[in-house]
Amino acid sequence: MNSNSLVSFGKQVIDYHINLNANWKLPQGVDLLYPFDDENTKLVFSKFYFKYFDDNHTRHFLFGINPGRFGAGVTGIPFTDPKILEERCEIPNSFRKKNELSAIFVYDFINNLGGLEAFYSKFYITSVCPLGFVKDGKNYNYYDDKILYKAVEEKIVENINVQKSFGCNEDTAFCMGNGKNFKFFNILNEKHHFFHRIIPLPHPRWVMQYRLKSKMEYVYKYVEEISSVL
């Protein structure tokens, strides 16, 4: 049950993210991706979570790594780029309509799980680390550098705990990334006991970049694993 039943799941998501502090102390050469200083981002972000999460349902969580430059780094919404946001979610936006590979895969498996309304009524996609990073003009992950990880570990733990309070099924979570993301997330879970179990899944970007010809096999794997908790 949602710990704050008077406030919808979506309103809690909006309030938490829009009020994230951007003053993170990061290693030299690493910059923070902070999309919420853009009024257009805040607008479409709010529309999305009011559209699909304006209720008090308890949801299973899926955790990506951290936001990237062309998806959540623009829209604020994990694995949702401006093109998908407008065409599939029917939320017009003024951003450049550039697709993000991971987003294409995610919305394909969502479609195979009954569509947006059905999926989002039971599941919530977020990230282990709430904000992303850039180094040398490229996406950078929280686990790519030991110094970076140590700098953001406390924020990661806080991020997971705060979002769990929105209305989370603590029995099973999914980790999108069965390599380093799962390794680090699992270590944190063993220490902090966020979830009873975490099911690892191949990262959408990896599938689209290295297994594109077999994409539907991975879509069906997602569908099978996610359906197992329903």
Image: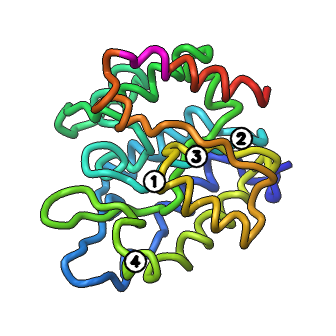
Mark 4 Cα within 10 Å, few/some/many (few <14, many 20+)? Answer: few
**Residue that carries the numbered disc 1 in the rendered image:** 65
How far is disc 4 from disc 1 in space, using C-alphas?
A: 15 Å
User: Do labels 2 and 1 touch, CB within 8 Å?
Assistant: no
Q: Mark 4 sits on what residue?
A: 146
The front one of 189 and 21 is: 189
User: 186 or 48: nearer the eye?
Assistant: 186
Callout 1: 10 Å neighbours few (<14), some, many (20+)? many
Instruction: Name the side, left or right, on which 185 lies relative to 2.
Output: left
* Disc ID at residue 175: 3
Q: Are marks 2 and 3 in contact (CB under 8 Å)?
A: no
Left or right side of 61 for 5: right
Residue drawn at the location 45% of the way across and 14% of the way down: 216
Start and end of the magenta stretch? 214-218
Q: CA distance from mark 1 to mark 3?
A: 8 Å
**Mark with earlier residue (1, 3):** 1
Residue 224: numbered disc: none
Task: Tell me which amino acid carries mark 1.
Answer: Ile
**Mark toward the start of the polypeptide (2 vs 3):** 2
Q: Nearer the viewer, mark 2 or mark 3?
A: 3
Amino acid, disc 3: Cys
Q: Give coordinates of residue 225: x percent, y percent.
A: 67, 28
Q: Label for residue 60? A: 2
Q: Nearer the viewer, residue 153 or 98?
A: 153
- Mark earlier in primary sequence (4, 2): 2
